Image (tube, rainbow, N blue to C red):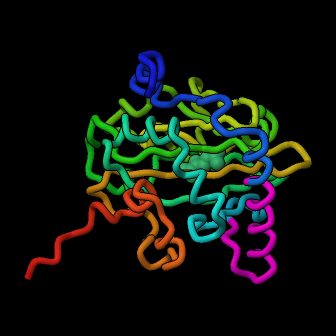
């Protein structure tokens, strides 16, 4: 389902923007739900704030927080990109909201969990990959994700804290786009210098042999599992469980 050019962008630069991946109506509904969840979790003091001055907020375990997220994570073009990178049996590592609030500074450039914990050189092939769902237009001013093109080929190196790399680029684009990024690419969110939050979803995937970032079996309700499609079940790890032979 990916074109030769899309595959080549993933191989060479390590990222790809899928424009118009989400309809305007779905984008608006996802954004509203994302901000409602963020506000609710702040009210009950369960919120995961990070960056200086609580500049950013994560809402975890979206599969359990609304049917619209169960559908969203099965978006065919996004999944085709993940399957290209991580294998046809790849699984969901986590699905979260990431809000970058006005005044948030740049986050540090990083590679994704658990790559930084691996011995070096890291593998040449992708192990994990993220999809960043633009629920707002991503602009130079409001915190658009930045990436260092080709940095997934630097198998021995890690980005140094506080350094602005000359070759880093900001990935700007209209709401409704999805950025696919190999987890080995050096990347991070940017400062939000506007007066409105930048809202994104992060659909984070891994090879089926890896332990996911969230334990879906403990976190996702029986009700959600009972209505899950075969694709969603596979993404939650039902097809890649350890065996129970005695
Ligand atoms: O929200 C973003 O722009 C990027 C988030 C990110 O870098 C991450 O979660 O690894």
Judging depth in this view, the residue of 88 and 103 nearest the camera is: 88
Q: Is residue 31 magenta?
A: yes
Q: Is residue 50 magenta?
A: no
Q: Position of residue 121 (x, y in %)?
A: 26, 41
**At 42% across and 19% down in the image, what residue appears?**
8
Q: With 151 as the anchor, is 16 left or right in this view?
A: right
**At 59% across and 36% down in the image, what residue appears?**
179
The answer to which quarter of the image holds residue 25 is top right
Q: Quadrant of the C terminus?
A: bottom left
Q: With 37 as the anchor, is 217 left or right in this view?
A: left
Q: Position of residue 197 (x, y in %)?
A: 82, 51
Q: Main secondary structure of the magenta part?
A: helix
Q: Which residues are magenta?
A: 30-49
Q: Quadrant of the N terminus?
A: top left
Q: Position of residue 71 (x, y in %)?
A: 58, 54
**At 66% across and 70% down in the image, what residue appears?**
48
Find the residue positioned furthest to the top.
5
**At 55% across and 47% down in the image, what residue appears?**
161
Judging depth in this view, the residue of 134 and 14 nearest the camera is: 134
Q: With 48 as the anchor, is 3 left or right in this view?
A: left
Q: Is residue 182 above or below residue 110?
A: above
């Amino acid at each position: 389902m990916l074109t030769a050019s899309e595959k080549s962008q993933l191989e060479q630069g390590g990222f790809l923007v899928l424009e118009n991946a989400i309809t305007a109506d779905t984008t608006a509904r996802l954004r509203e739900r994302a901000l409602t969840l963020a506000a609710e979790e702040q009210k009950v003091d369960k919120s995961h704030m990070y960056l200086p001055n609580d500049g950013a907020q994560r809402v975890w375990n979206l599969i359990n927080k609304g049917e619209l997220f169960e559908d969203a994570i099965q978006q065919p073009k996004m999944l085709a990109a993940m399957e290209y990178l991580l294998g046809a049996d790849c699984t969901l590592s986590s699905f979260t909201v990431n809000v970058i609030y006005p005044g948030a500074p740049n986050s540090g450039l990083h590679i994704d969990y658990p790559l930084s914990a691996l011995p070096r050189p890291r593998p040449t092939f992708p192990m994990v990959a993220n999809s960043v769902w633009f629920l707002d237009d991503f602009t130079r001013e409001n915190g658009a994700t930045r990436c260092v093109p080709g940095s997934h080929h630097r198998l021995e190196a890690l980005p140094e804290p506080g350094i602005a790399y000359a070759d880093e680029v900001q990935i700007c684009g209209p709401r409704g786009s999805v950025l696919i990024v190999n987890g080995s690419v050096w990347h991070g969110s940017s400062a939000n210098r506007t007066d409105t939050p930048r809202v994104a979803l992060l659909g984070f995937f891994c090879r089926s042999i890896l332990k996911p970032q969230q334990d879906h079996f403990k976190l996702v309700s029986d009700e959600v599992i009972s209505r899950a499609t075969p694709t969603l079940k596979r993404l939650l790890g039902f097809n890649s469980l350890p065996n129970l032979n005695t």
